[in-house]
Image (spheres, helix red, strand yellow):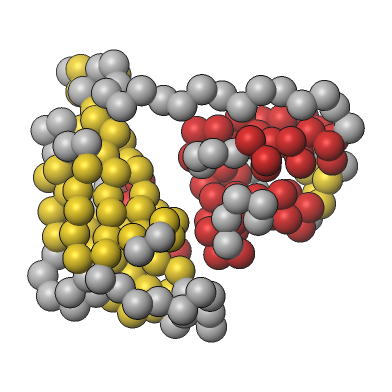
Amino acid sequence: MLRRAELIAALRLRYDHYSAESVFEAARSRCGYVDQETYSPNEVAQLRAALAKVGDRMGNVFAQLDALLDTPAAPAPPPEPVVAAPTVVAGPVRAEIETTVALTGLEAATDEQLLMCGGAPDLGDWDPEKACTMTRAKDAWTTTLRVPTDAAIEFKFIRRAADGTLTWEPGDNRTLVAKPRLEVTWR
């Protein structure tokens, strides 16, 4: 059995504390598990598979999970293609594009977190606790989402301070459309 804290510690090899918690929650939710203190090796294996879908560059995390389970390291999954094959969702075929959102112009403390929240499940359906966590990359905050080609999704950025205080980006909602990269500046 592995403790939840050990799983979060493995994710901290890749993410800051808040992001590690968010990525873990996304994987746990994807597996349909309730939050619990310990996870069986089988549950960890399923969480590992879910992490491959919700996280990126997880090689060190997977190596740590394998070490915790005392199993040989499995290779990290290959990155998903930029343009996805159409998927069937109980009806017509919807094509999706992997869209990277890059936000600049934001001075943030190292213990702050940046979220992207909006009107789609991947953006938390306007619930900040379910919002998409962004990752700091040099002078930009980034995240990558799969966006249906026919979508126009309203969203906003949120800053989360170390004490949990949320600050929504001022101004009108932004619109996310399917394209390879969306570069924006904090308002």
Seen at 28% across and 54% down, the residue is 102
Query: Is 90 displayed left or right of 40 in the figure?
Result: left
Position in image of residue 115 (x %, y %): 37, 63
Seen at 78% across and 52% down, the residue is 6
Q: In the displayed image of the protein, which residue is found farthest to the front? A: 138
Seen at 36% across and 59% down, the residue is 141
Q: Nearer the viewer, residue 56 or 25?
A: 56
* Residue 89 visible in the snapshot: no
* Residue 76 visible in the snapshot: yes
Q: Is residue 15 above or below residue 64?
A: below
Report how many numbered discs are placed on residues in the image: 0
Query: Is 1 displayed left or right of 177 in the figure?
Result: right
Residue 114: name its quadrant: bottom left
Query: Is 149 displayed left or right of 138 in the figure?
Result: left
Considering the image in quadrants, where does the N terminus appear? top right
Seen at 17% across and 74% down, the residue is 187
Position in image of residue 126 (x %, y %): 30, 61
Residue 42: name its quadrant: top right
Q: Is residue 20 above or below residue 79?
A: below
Query: Is 13 displayed left or right of 5 in the figure?
Result: left
Position in image of residue 69 (x %, y %): 85, 35
Position in image of residue 169 (x %, y %): 24, 74
Q: Nearer the viewer, residue 33 or 3?
A: 3
